[in-house]
Image: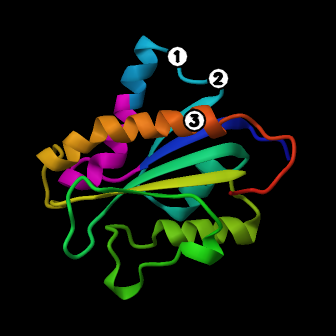
Amino acid sequence: MEPVARTAVIGIGNEFRRDDGVGWAVIASLQDRAARRPLPPGTVLAQSDGDPGRLIGLWEDTALAVVVDACFPPSAQPGRTHRWSGHPERSFHSAGPARHSTHGLGLAEAVRLGDILRRRPLRLVVYAVEGADRSLGTGLTPAVARALPGLVRRIEADMDRYGEVPAHGPRDE
């Protein structure tokens, strides 16, 4: 099936849980950027609560899906950003009982379900930003807010590099 959109950038989170809103803040930054300078044609920006069904609906039939979410590991270094792009069987796994996400079912489960249903983007890139505070309230902590501009630049580079619809080839690198 031909991709519907070249690129979907999906910010997962909750803007009322401090650093858990980093995914939504990325989308807001990209929307601001689009007002000044157009995004690549076919780019869709979306905010999500992380529900697996909604995620699959947002990324299916895209050439590239970039997903941004906060994570809260033990000994977090707020603002540190992890990038993942590859095959889920090799390196993407559920956080399990000691999960680092604030969502009931996580992104790993959505990726696996998308694979099973054959409703996955051609290429998936995930950014996880370590957060410090997921308490009730608005606004990112200073360390996470400082990481935002660099993260947006990295996502823009991914859109430039991977946003074209490939003629053939693997679904991921």
Tell me the residue that label 3 is attached to: 159
**108 lies left or right of 22:** right
Q: Which residue lies at the image location 69% right of the left edge and 35% below the top edge?
A: 5
Pointer 2 or 3: first along the chain: 2
- Report the number of discs: 3
Whether residue 95 sits left or right of residue 86 in the image: it is: left
Q: Position of residue 71 (x, y in %)?
A: 32, 64
Question: Which residue is depicted at the point 21% across and 50% down?
Answer: 16
Residue at x-position 47% and y-position 39%: 155
**Secondary structure found at label 3:** helix
What is the span of residues highlighted in magenta in the rendered image? 12-29
When the figure is inspected, residue 105 is found, relative to residue 58, above or below; the finding is below
Q: Residue at x 62, y 76 (%)?
A: 90
**Nearest the camera: 153 or 16?**
153
Query: Tag 1: residue type?
Result: Pro
Q: Mark 1 and mark 2 in contact (Cβ < 8 Å)?
A: yes
**Quarter-of-image position of residue 100:** bottom left
Q: What is the three-letter code of the residue carrying label 3?
A: Met
- Checking the image for residue 9, the label placed there is none
Q: Position of residue 147 (x, y in %)?
A: 26, 44
Badge 2 is on which residue? 41
Residue 16 located within the stretch drawn in magenta: yes
* Residue marked by disc 1: 38
Q: Secondary structure at mark 1?
A: loop
Q: Are marks 1 and 3 in contact (CB under 8 Å)?
A: no
Cα distance between the residues tagged 2 and 3: 10 Å
